[in-house]
Amino acid sequence: MRALLLIDIQNDFLPGGALAVPEGDAIIPVVNRLQGQFDLVVATQDWHPENHQSFASSHKSRNTFEVIKLQSLNQVLWPDHCRQGSKGAEFSDAVDMSRVETIFRKGMNPEIDSYSGFYDNGHLKSTGLTDYLRGKEVTEVYVAGLAADFCVYFTAKDALQEGFSVSIVEDATRAISPEGFEKAKADIESKGGKLVQSHTLIS
Ligand code: VGL
Ligand code: ZN
């Protein structure tokens, strides 16, 4: 079985949002076209409580995009984004959610960030996504969404580690930093993952 993972296609990551990814909205028609090609479609939703430690605003005299140590991990300090219940945390109205079977939320623990749909950044707690996919006999995972160099990358990396065959759909993602995505792609390919274009998937 083949699953499409739609990562964090939320208003805050789209133009006008608190942590807008350049051209993030360009992926929406692509993900909408793609969904029909998959046995299963699952979404993730970044879902932070107030005072999440990944927010620059949670730290005294720190600027956004500064990097600090949090639980001995490097942590980029983000603008406040995807606050639970906010408009910014909602999926874009333009994304077709009709085939999305389940939504895995992440980033609820205020003490640690959670880029991947599978685990927090310290790999301390699982979201249950691996078991969910295995329960549906998924062996191949395709990753799309935002942002390419953070949540898409970390999700793809964990999916590889969990033993799935993994592809990132390159034209169905956009990065915060293009250089960051170049490094991420090289790392995914070195671990056996693939980068594919959506037209190769649409029959
Ligand atoms: C993300 C930064 C902070 C993402 C989430 O979805 O890529 N990036 N939280
Ligand atoms: Zn976040």
Image: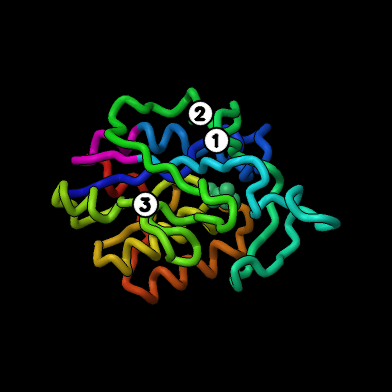
- Residue identified by numbered label 2: 92
Q: Amino acid at mark 1?
A: Asp
In this rendering, would 160 be left or right of 12?
A: left
Q: Can you tell which quarter of the image residue 124 is in? A: bottom left
Earlier sequence position, callout 1 versus callout 3 = 1
Mark 3 crowd level (few <14, some 14–19, many ≥20, 10 Å Cα):
some
Indicate the position of residue 116 as horizontal and vertical percent values. 44, 56
Indicate the position of residue 90 as horizontal and vertical percent values. 52, 29
Mark 1 and mark 3: Cα distance apart in space: 27 Å
- Residue identified by numbered label 1: 25
Q: In the rendered structure, are the residues bearing label 1 and label 2 in contact, judged by CB atoms less than 8 Å apart?
A: yes
Q: Residue furthest bottom?
A: 190
Q: For the residue labelled by badge 1, is the local secondary structure a helix, a strand or a loop?
A: helix
- Residue shown at 85% from the left, 57% from the top: 61
Q: What range is drawn magenta here?
A: 33-42
- Tell me, for residue 86, which label it has, or none: none
Earlier sequence position, callout 1 versus callout 2 = 1
Q: Is residue 152 visible?
A: yes
Q: Amino acid at mark 2?
A: Ser
Q: Nearer the viewer, mark 1 or mark 3?
A: 3
- Tell me, for residue 127, which label it has, or none: 3
In this rendering, would 186 be left or right of 176?
A: left
In reply to whether residue 30 is colored magenta, the answer given is no
